[in-house]
Amino acid sequence: MSEIQELARMMKELEVQVIVCMRCGMCQAVCPVYSPDRKGS
């Protein structure tokens, strides 16, 4: 599989994970959305 195809597959997988996110906050320790230095929040 080419690097571009692999990247496209990984992006699609990430998209699916983001869509099903329930925004429960359980990922706060690792999710950049909950980063204390996040700008614009």
Image (cartoon, rainbow, N blue to C red):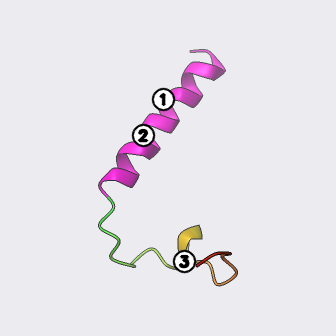
Label 2 or label 3, whichever comes before in sequence order: 2
Q: Any magenta on residue 5?
A: yes
Q: Which residue is mark 3?
A: 34
State left or right for residue 16 relative to residue 34: left
- Residue 13, label in figure: 2
Question: What separation in Å lies between label 2 and label 3 (alpha carbons)?
Answer: 21 Å
The x and y percentages for residue 22 are 29, 67
Q: Nearer the viewer, residue 39 or 5?
A: 39
Label 1 sits on what residue type?
Arg
State left or right for residue 28 relative to residue 7: left
Give the farthest residue toward the front: 40
Q: Is residue 27 above or below residue 15?
A: below
Camera sees residue 31: no
Q: Which residue is mark 1?
A: 9
Report the magenta residues as a range: 1-20
Q: Is residue 3 above or below residue 29?
A: above
State left or right for residue 23 relative to residue 4: left
Label 2 sits on what residue type?
Glu
Most common secondary structure along the magenta stretch: helix
The x and y percentages for residue 35 are 61, 78
Question: What separation in Å lies between label 1 and label 3 (alpha carbons)?
Answer: 26 Å
Q: Residue at (37%, 51%) from the top-left corner?
A: 17
Give the farthest residue toward the top: 1
Name the quadrant containing residue 29. bottom right
The x and y percentages for residue 10 are 51, 36
The x and y percentages for residue 33 are 54, 70
Question: What separation in Å lies between label 1 and label 2 (alpha carbons)?
Answer: 6 Å
Q: Is residue 35 above or below residue 4?
A: below
Label 1 or label 3, whichever comes before in sequence order: 1
Q: Residue at (64%, 84%) from the top-left corner?
A: 36
Q: Residue at (68%, 75%) from the top-left corner?
A: 39
State left or right for residue 15 relative to residue 33: left
